[in-house]
Image: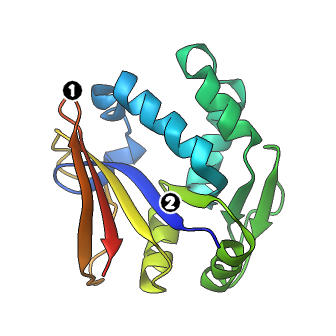
Amino acid sequence: MARLIIWNLMSLDGYFEGPNHDLSFHEDVWGPELQELSLEQLRAAGALLFGRLTYRLMADYWPTAEGEIGEIADFMNSLPKVVVSRTLKKSDWGNTRIVGENAAEQVAKLKRDTEKDIYVFGSANLSATLIAAKLFDEFRIGLAPRLLGGGTPLFKPGERRKLRLIEASPHANGLVRLRYAPV
């Protein structure tokens, strides 16, 4: 059975994207340490899970990504991908399956049927559904030394959950990588 892991960069004030879906703060913390972490996580992945909005951003970017992130692009393009969406009907990004209804039930089945870890990137709305259903086995957050002052929060108001710290690792550029497990 696979573990379901959320991985996101987040600003110190709790946003995983700034106003108007601005992700420019990612550039502040991208570097060799985060690149190696990305490869490590992708090597451990059996599947990637996205909500519709994040999926569209990823599907527009990764098929043509080149340069120093080429190896990451290879993983992103080849790994099995599952998109949870009631409106998306087809995908042009290879190795993608669309799940339309009963997200929590479908993800629980995906966990049972997959051997390696399943990662959720971005996808705040889908993540809120999966958090409420208590399906995440681990929360991985890259806490960026940036205040965005607004945007989309990673965690929605109202959900209360106790977590246990597994690891806290500072990076040279100020990012702090945090790993938590539900208690």
Is 183 rendered above or below residue 31?
below
The type of colouring in the image is: rainbow
Please give the name of the residue rendered at 71% of the width and 81% of the height, measured from the top-left corner: 101
Q: Secondary structure at mark 1?
A: loop
Tell me: residue 83, above or below residue 41.
Answer: below
Q: Front-most of 64 and 131?
A: 131
Label located before the other in sequence (1 or 2): 2
| Residue ID at (29%, 30%) | 29
* Residue 6 visible within the image: yes
Residue 78 as seen in the image, left or right of residue 31? right
Query: What residue type is disc 1 on?
Result: Asn
Q: Nearer the viewer, mark 1 or mark 2?
A: 1
Q: Mark 2: few, some, or many residues within 10 Å (few <14, many ≥20)?
A: many
Q: Position of residue 76 (x, y in %)?
A: 66, 39
Q: 183 and 158: which one is in front? A: 183
Which mark, residue 123?
A: 2
107 with respect to 27 (left or right): right
User: How far is disc 1 from disc 2 in space, using C-alphas?
Assistant: 25 Å
Name the quarter where the N terminus is drawn. bottom right
Relative vertical location of residue 146 with respect to residue 106 in this rendering, above or below: above
Q: Give the quarter of the figure containing the C terminus.
A: bottom left
Check disc 2 and give the amino acid type. Ser
Query: At 70% across and 24% down in the image, what residue appears?
Result: 64
User: Mark 1 = which residue?
Assistant: 173
